[in-house]
Image (spheres, coloured by chain):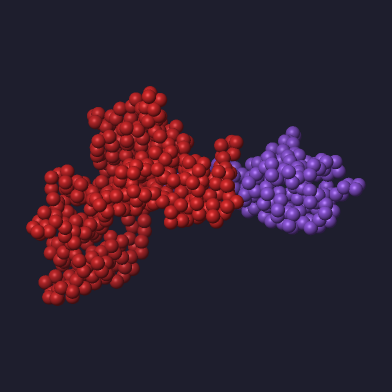
Chain colours: A purple, B red
Amino acid sequence: MKFASAAGLIRLLLQQSDRHPIRSIGAADLQPYDPRFVRTLRNLGVLTEREDLRDDGATVFQVDDDALIVVDPETGACEREGDALDIRAFDIDIGAICRAIREQSGLVGPGPSALSTRVWRLGRYVRQDRSAEICLVRRLREATAQEVVDHVRGAIDTEASVTLISLGRIDLPAAVARQLDAMPPVSGKLSAALFFSNFQEGGIGQ
Amino acid sequence: MPKRIRNFVDRAFSRTVDLELLHRLLAPYLRHIDFDWDGLPEEDGERRDAIFDLFAKADMRFPAKLQFALYNISTLSTDAGARIIQEIASDAGTDVLAAFRAEDSADDLRFTPRFIALITWLDHRPIFDRALSAAAFLAHSTKLERDAEREDVDLRHHDAGVQDGFAEAARLHFASRYNGHYCEVRWFEEEDLLRVLILHGSKAETKNVDQEGTEDTLKFREIVQSTIEYDQRRSSIAVGSKSATDAKKLVKLFGDHVLGDGDIFEASAKEELYTLAPLQRRGAAFRFAFQPEGEITHVALREVRVDEAQLTTTGRLRRSPWYLTLGDSENALRRLKDVAPEIDVADVRIVHAKIDVTIEVDDSEIVVPVTIRPPRTVSMRDHSHERLILEMLEDNEIRKRRRTDQAAAAAE
């Protein structure tokens, strides 16, 4: 059986992690992917399954022989779906993603730890005489870039460069960009290249 | 105690009701309810206390006809009920309060909605009955709305046999669904609105009741009201009914019998009639626009609920495991931005919005709470100002313009 590319699923996880609050992944979203890969992500703790939803605040759900019955208590209207995928969801654990990246990339030193709800310190990347602290940043946006940079500078007491990995696409403002040092691509030894496939990177000179 | 009587267990009512009117209402039943009117205390306060006790201790022993009268009177004993009575009376060239007006006083504090309902029931029964039918159209807070997919359809309800055919089809539906036999259909025309009132049975109910000191079981099938309103300007239909299944059936029957096409409303069952996209686009900066000199004087965004549900590529709604409901006295989106600044309103679904619409009526202001729940539902407790409110929602691009307007715009 042919399954969709695992990289596609990783990309989806990272995109959904970049939103606030972090979005859940619906059972229907996972259907195109190899169940063995999904199992691996569950074993890693990246995905955790929720109980089937009983209601969503407006409508009530009942599962009957795998079919989903959606009842609107206000109007009594009932709708029937052939399966219950719509109410089955998995939570993304951003901490588990950070652990996986750290482990697969051979990062060392302190981490992974949350510096804020948006910034995770993954660990230190060391190669020959160069090293950099790697941070994963959710919702790195033009308007918040300076705030994040200041926060990271205050939180990490190091002489080494700091690399921010944004989960989304961003054009940093010129004022922030001027503070950044050009860093060589860090993909070389980072075996979690899969995770990084959708990233934009920038290093901060300290 | 039956609800219809409970509505009269009210201090304000017993202290203020016109005793002569109440005597006239109760006179035929005094023997049945074991109430000695002539033996009431002389002093006004004590008389009224005795009347309060009468209703407070009332039970199912009240004769059915009296219960029916009290129920109907209480139905119209609201501000909206009084307004309907006075409008219908004025159309008929009648002043229901004429006999009670003092010559030197234009306004009388006795003229409460309950007083007006009571006097109309006693002295102007045809006007009362018409007002009761009209009030039925205000009773359903949520209506099933649909658009006809074509505009080139003529109403055929004046053709021979159409009204009877519709009534018979409705009767068959309710008879098969509830095994009920009662079904009455009334037709009303008003400018570009055709209204149909269907009185019909509902599911049988069983209650355990106190019957003169012994336990008894009462089985009954309540007669409920379903309403149909067809707006000829927009070729749109709105059906009020306790059951969504009945509402859908009535839409189909109306299309079939009155418009000659049972499927004419089918397409719009999947269309979006309401959207909160303007709120999502503008977020905290969103403001409702309304005519500065119009009857609407203020609109407050009292509540929003957001969640992460989204339509999948297959068109199904992936349900959200969380929702956030936030209220504010003036602008819930602005409050949301304060409370949860990280939430990007454009990146979540607004499940519903509740607004308070302030409307100027006869030199005073009333507030109508309205809930907007896309894609197809708007609820309001008081439908008296429905058109005004829906037009305001259209102006704000929350209610999608009907085809007629789109066609007119295209023609320009």
In the displayed structure, does residue A193 sit left or right of residue B251?
Answer: right
In the displayed structure, does residue A23 sit left or right of residue A196?
Answer: left
The residue nearer to you, when weighing B391 against B204, is B391
Q: Where's residue A133, x and y in %?
A: 80, 51
Q: Residue furthest left?
A: B103
The residue nearer to you, when weighing B230 against A128, is A128
- Asked if B10 appears above or below B396 in the picture, the reply is below
Q: In which quarter of the image is the N terminus of chain B?
A: bottom left
- Asked if B404 appears above or below B30 in the picture, the reply is above
For the point 13% across and 45% down, which residue is it?
Answer: B93
For the point 9% across and 59% down, which residue is it?
Answer: B104
Q: Where's residue B110, x and y in %?
A: 18, 62
In the displayed structure, does residue B344 sit left or right of residue B153?
Answer: right
Q: In which quarter of the image is the C terminus of chain B?
A: top left
Q: Where's residue B280, x and y in %?
A: 51, 43
Q: Where's residue A197, x and y in %?
A: 76, 39
Residue B390 in sight in this render: no
Q: In which quarter of the image is residue A112?
A: bottom right
The residue nearer to you, when weighing B390 against B104, is B104
Q: In which quarter of the image is residue B111?
A: bottom left
For the point 17% across and 43% down, which residue is it?
Answer: B91
For the point 53% across and 49% down, which residue is it?
Answer: B306
Residue B16 in sight in this render: yes
Q: Residue furthest top?
A: B411
